[in-house]
Structures are given as structure tokens and as C-alpha cells.
Image: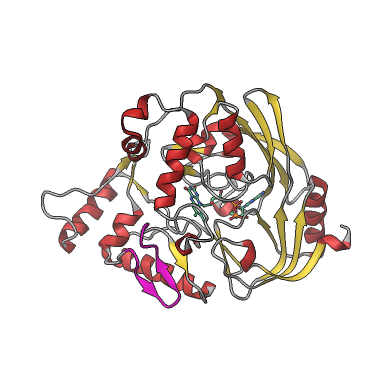
């Protein structure tokens, strides 16, 4: 690796949307695939821990930083293999690519408008919003194996997409660097709208809305919740949702509903909100559990708050530290567990804790 690419003691805070986090011992921004290969090889040879960073919109970096190499993937390029089959480099900005797809009249990504981060970051947790999941549009993911250095294409099946998960997340998080994603879109000007909130927002237009109108509606809904990065909106200094919505079987749901009745969160006739999540499972809004555990939107602890517009988002206020963000997240998790017997899973990935 050419030494100018490798920097030392680089503060991570500006590379994350939460804006907290100390220095990476080594830091490298890779603009080409061979830079990525070299950086991964160097970390292997030197036995440095390696963290792969995209847009930093789904991470919490610790105040003490990261004791190894942070590799920021900044490769660029969008190539049409066929008119509706697009190969995109991992470092491309996600929302710019969504906008391009809408402008080209290609359907599939419009409901995923306004999500920050890179294209390479999207398969990791199978990003989803407003009734769409990115995995449904992915034909294949081009990856570099961190252990062997081999480059390969994984088809959609091999990516193991699930609700906020894939083979690139969780226990297997350190296996691959995503180099690019190939999207199979639909050359169809008619969006498929399935999400009730989006349908309500579009009203009479829902049946005939264009891709551009759906994109605009999603952006407007998101802006109202502080879910679009906006330097003028202090409530958008977040990592998006901090907690995943639990997916449970019917028995587990019934026991949580019973706990809610005992706590007076639900009356005898009331029922817990839930959504079908396939295979007989149900998705429970984590926001409902958090509010049921007694946390209000806008609740503030030190320099961290629950967004006043979105109960799942933790906002880093001026002067916040990573320890404070984690502290509030843990307090919420503990209180929900105490009350409902269920441990919420964090959505952002922790760096250096
Ligand atoms: C305001 C806001 C709104 C959001 N709304 C949504 C939403 O609606 N739905 C949703 O699903 N998410 C949402 N998010 C979370 C986040 O934007 C997405 O998860 C995004 O895809 C993360 O991409 P990134 O490039 O920023 O990844 P990073 O935050 O940099 O990294 C996240 C994880 O992906 C890994 N990673 C990133 N790039 C690569 C790569 N090239 N190869 C291997 N691993 C990689 C990292 O190692 C880390 O584990 C939101 C975040 C914010 C701040």
C-alpha cells in the first residue's frame, strides 16, 4: 500500500452520523478495489484488527477509538449491465443512486429513499423502510474474502437476507468486504406501495403515483421524523433506529401482551401492535415497548436524547460522548427487559467497545 493512503490516529467522529468516537490507530480511504485489497492484506500481515466503514450512518464508535485499521470504502462507479441490471461500486452514495434509479424509470428502490450511507452498506443489515427491503432488489454482491483475499460474486440466495440481517452481519460480520452490488430493478414506472403510512400520505394518488412522487412522499415523511440527514436539524444527528423491532412467535407475543396488561400499558380489551413477519412470526414495534417501559420521546439524559419525533432514534446532542449514547441505549434495553422480559437488539454496529 502506498504510504500516503495510510493515515495514523484519525478521529472517527466526523466519519459517523452520530458524530462521536475517538481515533482509529490507522485509517485508510480506499478509492479503488486494489486499495481495498492492499489494505486488507496489510491488516492481515500486521495482525491489525480491521473495521470496514462505509458512510458511518449505522455505527457507534467508542470514545477510545479503534486499536487497528479502519478501512473506509470509497470506490465509485455505476455500470448498466442491462437497462434494468445495474452494477454499483460499494462507495457510491446510496440516496444518489436511488435518485438515479427513479430518474431512469426503474422501480424497486423508491421506498428506500433518504437512507444515508453507501451502497456497500445496504446489504449488511438488508436495509428496509416503508415496506421495502434492499435484498429483494439485489441480484448479487461482489465481495472480497478478508481471510483469503479472494474476490467472488454471491447471488441473492447466498446473501441470506432476513429482517435487518444477512450473512454480512452478526457473527459473520468480519468475513467479507463488500466491493459492489448488482441491482435487478423493474423497468416499470408503477411503484408497488404496500405500507399503510405511505398509502395514507399519498391518499387518492396512491394507486397512480409515479416513482418520483413516491420518492418525494417518502422523503417528506422521513424529514418529519428527523430520519433524513440535515445539518440544520439537530435531531438528525443519529444512527437512525437504535433498536431492531423484535420478531417473535405467537406464544412469545402472547406473553409480552400479558406483561403489558399486568403493567397497565394495555387494558383488558387492548392488543399490542404487530405485523406479520413470515413463517408465522410477528414483528413488534420496539418503539411501542420503549414507550411502554416509560420512556417518552424527547427524554434526555446528559448530552443524549430520545428523538422528540421518533422513539427509536437516539440523538447525540452537542458535547455528547459515545459512552453517554451507549449508557442511554443500555438503560432503555434494561428497562424494556425488566418490564417485558425481552432484550432489544441494537441496530448500529459498535466499533472499539
Ligand atoms: C437518519 C438515519 C436514518 C436511517 N434510516 C434507515 C432506514 O430507514 N432503514 C435502515 O435499514 N437503516 C437506516 N439507517 C441506518 C443506515 O443508514 C443504514 O444501515 C446504511 O445502509 C448504513 O450504511 P453505511 O455505508 O453508512 O454503513 P456504516 O454505518 O459505515 O457501517 C455499518 C455496518 O456495515 C459495515 N459495512 C459498511 N460498508 C461495508 C462494506 N463495503 N463492506 C463490508 N462491510 C461494510 C460496517 O462494517 C458496519 O458493520 C438510518 C441511519 C440514519 C442516520
When the figure is inspected, residue 224 is found, relative to residue 262, above or below; the finding is: above
Residue located 43% across and 45% down the image: 220
Q: Front-most of 291 and 93? A: 93
Percent coordinates x, y for residue 180 in the rendering? 69, 40
Colouring of the image? secondary structure
- Find residue 207 and report its image quarter: top left
> On the rendered image, what quadrant is the N terminus found in?
bottom right
When the figure is inspected, residue 258 is found, relative to residue 10, above or below; the finding is: above
In-image side of 31 versus 220 (left or right)? right
Q: Is residue 157 visible?
A: yes
Give the magenta-colored segment's residue range: 297-310
Residue located 66% across and 30% down the image: 86
Q: Front-most of 30 and 224? A: 224
Residue located 34% across and 38% down the image: 201
Q: Front-most of 53 and 91? A: 91
Residue located 83% across and 53% down the image: 38
Percent coordinates x, y for residue 309 in the rendering? 36, 58
Residue 151 is covered by the magenta coloring: no
Q: Is residue 138 visible?
A: no
Percent coordinates x, y for residue 122 in the rendering? 57, 45
Residue reaching furthest to the right: 2
In-image side of 288 versus 56 (left or right)? left
Percent coordinates x, y for residue 204 in the rendering? 31, 29
Q: How many marks?
A: 0
Amino acid at each position: 500500500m502506498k504510504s500516503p493512503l495510510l493515515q495514523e490516529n484519525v478521529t472517527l467522529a466526523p466519519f459517523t452520523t452520530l458524530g462521536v468516537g475517538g481515533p482509529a490507530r490507522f485509517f485508510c480511504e480506499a478509492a479503488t478495489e486494489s486499495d481495498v485489497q492492499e489494505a486488507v492484506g496489510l491488516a492481515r500481515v500486521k495482525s491489525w484488527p480491521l473495521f470496514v466503514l462505509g458512510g458511518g450512518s449505522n455505527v457507534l464508535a467508542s470514545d477510545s477509538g479503534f486499536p487497528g485499521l479502519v478501512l473506509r470504502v470509497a470506490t465509485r462507479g455505476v455500470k448498466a449491465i442491462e437497462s434494468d441490471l445495474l452494477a454499483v461500486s460499494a462507495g457510491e452514495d446510496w440516496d444518489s443512486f436511488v435518485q438515479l434509479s427513479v430518474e431512469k424509470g426503474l422501480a424497486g428502490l423508491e421506498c428506500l429513499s433518504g437512507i444515508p450511507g453507501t451502497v456497500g452498506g445496504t446489504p449488511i443489515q438488508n436495509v428496509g423502510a416503508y415496506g421495502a427491503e434492499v435484498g429483494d432488489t439485489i441480484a448479487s454482491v461482489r465481495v472480497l474474502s478478508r481471510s483469503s483475499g479472494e474476490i467472488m460474486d454471491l447471488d441473492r440466495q447466498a446473501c441470506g437476507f432476513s429482517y435487518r440481517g444477512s450473512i454480512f452481519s452478526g457473527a459473520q460480520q468480519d468475513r467479507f468486504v463488500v466491493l459492489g452490488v448488482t441491482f435487478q430493478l423493474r423497468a416499470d414506472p408503477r411503484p408497488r406501495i404496500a405500507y399503510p403510512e405511505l398509502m395514507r400520505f399519498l391518499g387518492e394518488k396512491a394507486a397512480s403515483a409515479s416513482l418520483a412522487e413516491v420518492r418525494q412522499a417518502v422523503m417528506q415523511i422521513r424529514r418529519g421524523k428527523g430520519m433524513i440527514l440535515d445539518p440544520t436539524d439537530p435531531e438528525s444527528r443519529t444512527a437512525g433506529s437504535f433498536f431492531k423491532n423484535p420478531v417473535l412467535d405467537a406464544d412469545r407475543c402472547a406473553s409480552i401482551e400479558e406483561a403489558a396488561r399486568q403493567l397497565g400499558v394495555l387494558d383488558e380489551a387492548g392488543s399490542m401492535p404487530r405485523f406479520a413477519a413470515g413463517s408465522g412470526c410477528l414483528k413488534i414495534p420496539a418503539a411501542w415497548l420503549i414507550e411502554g417501559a416509560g420512556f417518552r420521546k424527547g427524554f434526555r439524559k446528559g448530552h443524549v436524547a430520545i428523538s422528540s419525533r421518533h422513539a427509536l432514534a437516539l440523538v447525540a446532542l452537542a458535547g455528547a460522548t459515545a459512552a453517554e449514547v451507549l449508557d442511554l441505549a443500555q438503560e432503555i434495553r434494561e428497562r424494556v427487559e425488566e418490564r417485558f422480559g425481552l432484550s432489544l437488539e441494537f441496530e448500529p454496529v459498535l466499533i472499539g467497545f
